[in-house]
Amino acid sequence: MIIDVTPSVLIDIVGEENTVKIMRKLKGCRLYIPKCKTLQDEIKQDYETMTSDHHQRVKDLAAYYEMSESNIRKILRKQGGLFEEY
């Protein structure tokens, strides 16, 4: 999912000083922030507790977490560090 984050949103999250640092460093670049392992673990746990078939579970998780089905499948296959590409 791509969302436009305004400076005021960044200020709320990281403060004004850090927002200025981010804006100076990135200068209008697109920024990708990966899902953290905690969310990935939550997705895996949700998958395990669902009773529908595999394809329906993937579809339902994608809709719930607002992610693509392919990204859900990648998360279900991966294990590893706190942050990782999915």
Image (cartoon, rainbow, N blue to C red):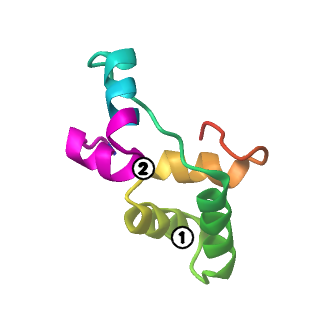
Percent coordinates x, y for residue 22 in the rendering = 38, 27
The boundaries of the magenta stretch are 2-17
User: CA gap, disc 1 to disc 2?
Assistant: 13 Å
Image quadrant in which the C terminus is located = top right
Q: Residue furthest toward the right? A: 80
The kind of residue on which mark 1 rests is Arg
Check disc 1 and report the residue beneath it.
Answer: 57
Choose mark 1 or mark 2, whichever is in front.
2
Check disc 2 and report the residue beneath it.
Answer: 68
Q: Is the magenta stretch mostly helix, strand or loop?
A: helix
Name the residue at 50% across, 70% down: 56
The kind of residue on which mark 2 rests is Ser
Q: Residue 33 carries which label?
A: none
The residue lying toward the viewer, choosing from 73 and 86, is: 86
The reply to whether residue 60 is visible in this rendering is yes
Q: Is residue 12 magenta?
A: yes
